[in-house]
Amino acid sequence: MTLQHDRSSVCFTLSACVYNRRPFWPHKSWLARIVQGARRRNMKFKLYLCALLVSYSVHAELYDFNDIATGTQVNSLNPFGSAVINTRLWVTEGGGTVAESFTRGVIDNPSFLNGTPSVVIEAGPLDAPGDRSNSRWNIEIGVSFQNPISAFSVDAYSAFYSTDLIYTGVNEMGEAFTLSGGWLGGLGDRIDHFDITAPTGGYITGFYFSQFEDNGSIMLALDNLDYTLAGGAIASAPVPETIGLSTFVFSIIGMLFLHRRMKAARK
């Protein structure tokens, strides 16, 4: 269901050095010389360095829903890391809502969605109570992030009709924004892929897409949700604190110096 991965090339290269593996160095840089020198230090220093590697890493998660039983209600699985997936079905009549459900979204694997489990919600005429002639049934899949997100990608599907993927967030001025991520769906069974990045200095708080009908059936689906937590601490949001590359490197140099002083004092 989830794959956590580290997208920091610095972490990969440094960790390879610490454990005496030979990484690919495009240049014999000063960073390479510092870390390769650390390989000759004791295990305690290596443990300190590993702790710094963890703090510098950029955390990302991917959810493909492949190991979840079909028919499972999506809301019973929340949260998916920092993501909360919500589905909604509501029926309107004469401008008012006459029926509503937040539990219709399930894990399903219809063949036209590549046969892989996905978040699916459907609706049709039978969902409208009473006289269906004046009713409209609506469905929506939405994702809200409990922590600020710097980027996300997702596969989305809309049967029969096209619709717009909308995402929300906060810009570098602290102002809320709502933007279009592009269109999905339409005639023909196809899955549309989206890669969305937050504006410079801002972050993403969620996204959604919806559909409505007053005659036939409609369906939406979501799969392969991938997102990356925004780096750095953001006020009033529980994001793990990260450190910059310069702070990271100077911390290594400081520990090397301290280790050398302690070693000299024991002689």
Image (spheres, rainbow, N blue to C red):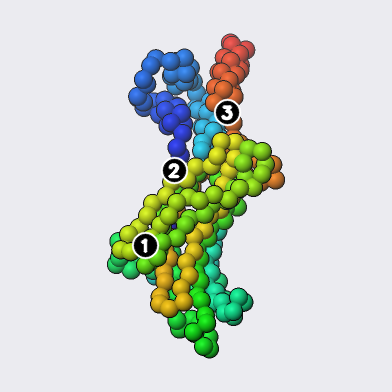
Label 1 or label 3, whichever comes before in sequence order: 1
How far apart are labels 1 and 2 at the CA level? 34 Å
What element does badge 1 sit on? loop
- Please report the residue visible at 39 percent of the width from the left and 26 percent of the height from the top: 20
How far apart are labels 3 and 2 at the CA level? 19 Å
Of the two numbered discs 1 and 2 in the rendering, the one whose residue sits closer to the viewer: 1
State which quarter of the image contains the N terminus. bottom left
- Please report the residue visible at 58 percent of the width from the left and 20 percent of the height from the top: 250
Under mark 3, the amino acid is Gly
Residue 194: percent from the left, percent from the top?
Answer: 42, 49
Label 1 or label 2, whichever comes before in sequence order: 2
| Residue of label 3 | 244
Q: Residues within 10 Å of mark 2 (few under 14, many from 20)?
A: few
Q: Choose top left, top right, bottom left or bottom right for residue 260.
A: top right
Of 192 and 212, which appears nearest the observer? Answer: 212
Report the disc number at residue 234: none
Of 188 and 8, which appears nearest the observer? Answer: 188
Q: Residues within 10 Å of mark 1 (few under 14, many from 20)?
A: some
Under mark 1, the amino acid is Gly
Of 104 and 183, which appears nearest the observer? Answer: 183
| Residue of label 1 | 186
Residue 215: percent from the left, percent from the top?
Answer: 43, 78
What element does badge 3 sit on? loop
Q: Is residue 126 left or right of residue 172?
A: left
| Residue of label 2 | 5
Q: Answer whether labels 1 and 2 touch (C-beta < 8 Å).
A: no
How far apart are labels 1 and 3 at the CA level? 44 Å
Q: Is residue 235 left or right of residue 153?
A: right
Q: Answer whether labels 3 and 2 touch (C-beta < 8 Å).
A: no
